[in-house]
Amino acid sequence: MHNFFGPPMAAIFIGMFVFMAVATVAGIISEYKKRQMELEPLRAAIERGQQLDPAIIERLMAREPYQNQDINPVHLRVGGIISIAAGIGVALLSPTVLVALPKWVFPLLGIGGLAVCVGIGLLVSARVVERSRTHA
C-alpha cells in the first residue's frame, strides 16, 4: 500500500502553491499592462505637445475605487449554492474511495463539510448585505 500522505502529496501541495503564486503575479502584471494601455493615449498627446482638457486628464487618471462597488447578493447566493453542492458532492465521494484509499474517507468528509460551511457563510452574507441595504 502506498503512503499517500508522503512525497506525492507534498508535490501536489507545492504545485498548488506555485500555481497560486503564478496566477497572482500574472493578475498583477495584467492589471499593470491594462493601466499602462489606458494611459498611453495621454502620454502620446503630452509628447506631441497637444493641449489637453483637464476633465479628460482627470477621467483618465481616476481609478475606480473598490470601496464604491456594491456587493451583489445574487452573486453571493450563486457562490453559496455552488459551494454547498460541491461540498455535498465531495462528501458523497468519500464512501466510494473506501476500498482503494481508506485513509482518505474522513479527510474527504472534512473537506466536504468545510465547503458546505463556506457555502452557508456566503448565503448568510448575502442576507446581511440585503438587510443592510434595506435599513440604509
Image (cartoon, grey):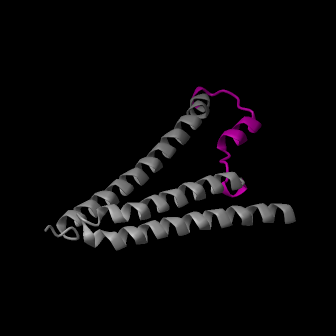
Residue 105, quarter of picture? bottom left
- Relative to 127, 39 lies left or right: left
Q: Quadrant location of residue 135? A: bottom right
Magenta residues span 47-68
On the image, the x and y values in percent for residue 58 come to 72, 42
Relative to 1, 40 lies left or right: right
- Total numbered circles: 0
Q: Position of residue 77 (x, y in %)?
A: 65, 56
**Could you say where residue 82 lies in the image, as x and y percent from the top left?**
55, 54
Residue lying at 55% horizontally and 41% vertically, measured from the top left: 35
Residue 101 colored in magenta in the image: no
Q: Report the residue that reaches farthest toward the right.
A: 135
Q: Residue at x 37, y 57 (%)?
A: 21
Q: Left or right: 65 with respect to 94?
A: right
Residue 59, x across and y down, in percent: 71, 40
Q: Residue at x 21, y 67 (%)?
A: 4
Query: In front here: 30 or 98?
Result: 98
Residue under the image location 40 percent in, 51 percent down: 23
Determine whether 40 is above or below 114 in the image. above
* Residue 55 is covered by the magenta coloring: yes
Quadrant of the image containing the C terminus: bottom right
Front residue of 115/34: it is: 115
Pick the front one: 89 or 129: 89
The one nearer the camera, 136 or 55, is 136
Q: Is residue 134 above or below residue 44?
A: below
Look at the image and tell me in which quarter the N terminus lies: bottom left
The reply to whether residue 72 is visible in this rendering is: no
Q: Is residue 6 visible?
A: yes
